[in-house]
Amino acid sequence: MSRTTKGDRAVNLTIRDMSKRYANGVQALDKVSLDVSPGMFGLLGPNGAGKSTLMRTLATLQEADSGSATLGSMDVLRDKDGVRRILGYLPQDFGLYPKVTANDMLDHFARLKGISDASQRKATVDALLERTNLADVRHRALGSFSGGMRQRFGIAQALIGNPQLIIVDEPTAGLDPEERVRFHNLLAGIGRETIVILSTHIVDDVADLCPSFAVISKGRVLLSGSPEANTRAIRGKIWRRTVAREAIEGVQKSLPIISSRPSGGEIVVHAYADSAPGAEFESAEPRLEDVYFSAVAGHIARPAA
């Protein structure tokens, strides 16, 4: 999963056997190990899979019970001040001061990041507003921003200080299609010499943006690697059938169905099997969505390069 990058800033993130159990007994992380190179890395999983726990731990917001994480030579779990200096973080719930303008809020964040020189701070803010296509609304109050504008502002603040590690947690949830495309274009332009971890349950976001990814469920990494290699690995094992709505419950109970979606008043189901699970099934070319659902259902659990 290694990648050649320009310059000396590019470093890898290595996570080994990271575990976290909450006081209520929930095992949020169970010996999670990942290798993340510079570029876009997708972390896929259902709600409650442990994605946000892992992201908050890497962002120094909570402690792991055991395990390790290193960013180059930096100990992520111990050198919290060092991590914060080179981290950009956009959490799932990104709070804003609604009456403060985008310009003033970014200026405040730049101060917090240690940019004390006023002219340097202004140049930084101007460049980030241009990059996120918010320059024209820089003097508008953040409370008047749309969801997509808020997310782009969130990326702008995460980019202050040229971070080496950027974490974005469920960034496109709730965005309309136009804003989602705009946000994708913004993210795609960031991940070159920087590690960008995209934590999401939206498979298409990972398929569109990430050359490497992992699936996590119930705190465990089920598989990792490239979308293409993992998709090839299940070729010939995905089967499709159209089912009447009134028959779907029986089909789901009796067959290895991994996903279903409505289509034209009926339901299209996908099944995982070595051979056709029934006469009405036809072979389907697998997509990353099939990899994800197959892994979560327990049909595949092995890494692919």
Image: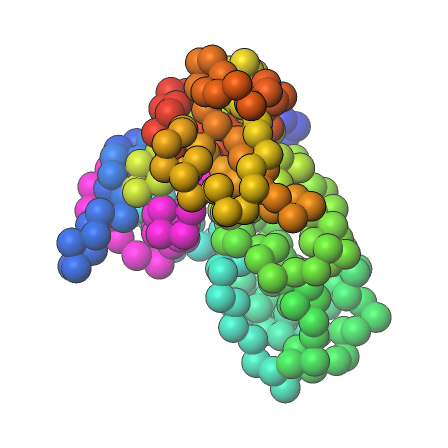
Compared to residue 285, the image places residue 62 above or below, namely below
Q: Residue at x 57, y 27 (%)?
A: 240
Front residue of this view, candidates 277 and 260? 277
- Would residue 52 be counted in the magenta stretch? yes
Q: Going by the image, does 62 lie left or right of 141?
A: left
Compared to residue 162, the image places residue 24 above or below, namely below
Q: Which residue is drawn at 56% across and 37% down?
A: 243
Q: Where is residue 106 in the image (x, y as percent from the top left)?
A: 64, 69
Q: Going by the image, does 136 lie left or right of 113?
A: right
Q: Residue at x 55, y 23 (%)?
A: 281
- Per the rendered image, the range of residues in magenta is 44-69
Q: How is the image coloured?
A: rainbow
The answer to whether residue 257 is visible is yes
> Quarter of the image holding residue 249?
top left
Q: Position of residue 87 (x, y in %)?
A: 49, 51
Question: Residue lying furthest bottom in this view?
Answer: 99
Q: Position of residue 71 (x, y in %)?
A: 42, 37
Front residue of this view, candidates 35 and 224? 224
Q: Going by the image, does 179 lie left or right of 280?
A: right
> Quarter of the image holding residue 288?
top right
Query: How many numbered badges does the structure rendering display?
Result: 0
Question: Residue lying furthest right in this view?
Answer: 136
Compared to residue 47, the image places residue 1 above or below, namely above
